Image (tube, rainbow, N blue to C red):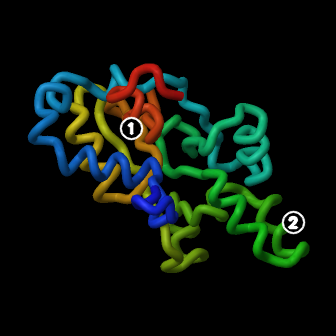
Amino acid sequence: MTNEANDIVGLMTQSKLIEFLYHKRAELKDKMSSIRAVDIARSPVASVNMNQFVIDAFKQIWEQQISGVAVVDDEGTLVGNISATDLVRTRVKPVGPIIHDLYQPIKHFNNIRTTMSEKVYMGDLPRYPPITVKSDDRLETIMETVVNNKVHRVYITDDALAPVGVISLSDIIRTFAPGSQ
């Protein structure tokens, strides 16, 4: 963003745009209440099993040119998320730790604890659960979820908590500007 003198005074991100539109929700009430999650999701969910190596998730992100994948357990239940940002975080480490991080199960990388022995072994390491919505949730709810949780994607889950869709910030923006990329 620039001022009248053409000086750069700020940066408009997708997150900031969504936040701005969310704060204008009263003026956008018709759109906010008529569009459902299932109407917004444009791409199939890319997922990886939590027992696969971290490198497998990053390979999928690279090959599919996406920003993140759902992490599921053996029953297909959504238990986490791994994104390109996680790869950036691993790159700040020396080579030895990077190799260690990439060739470990995702459940350890993401600190997903599924059994009592894993809970004891892994202790109180932080775990950030994936953010979800339901197919019938309206645009206002989805935007509120994104803004309040400061996330770039939300997963649509079924009653068994299996991911059936994904909504990115770009998908939300397209609802307001259908011709945008």
The number of callouts visible is 2
The x, y position of residue 158, in whole percent, is 35, 30
Element type at mark 1: loop
Q: Quadrant of residue 100?
A: bottom right
Kindly state the secondary structure of the residue where label 2 is placed. helix
Residue under numbered circle 1: 161
Q: Residue at x 37, y 48 (%)?
A: 17
Q: Residues within 10 Å of mark 1 (few under 14, many from 20)?
A: some
In the displayed structure, would residue 8 be above or below residue 162? below
* Sequence-first tag of 2 and 1: 2
Residue at image location 31% in from the left, 32% down from the top: 159
Cα distance in 3D space between marks 2 and 1 = 32 Å
Q: In this rendered view, identify the residue nearer to me: 138 or 78.
A: 138
Residue type, mark 2 in image: Ile
Residue in view at x 26 percent, y 44 percent = 21
Name the residue at 63% across, 58% down: 85
Mark 2 closeness class: few <14, some 14–19, many ≥20 residues within 10 Å? few
Can you see residue 130? no
- Location of mark 2 (residue): 99
Q: Which mark is residue 113?
A: none
Q: Does residue 101 appear to the left or right of 165 in the view shown? A: right
| Front-lying residue, 118 or 19 | 19
Residue 60 % position (x, y): 73, 38
Q: Quick check: 47 left or right of 166?
A: right
* Amino acid on which the number 1 mark rests in the picture: Leu
Q: Position of residue 59 (x, y in %)?
A: 79, 42
Position of residue 102 relative to residue 166, above or below, is below
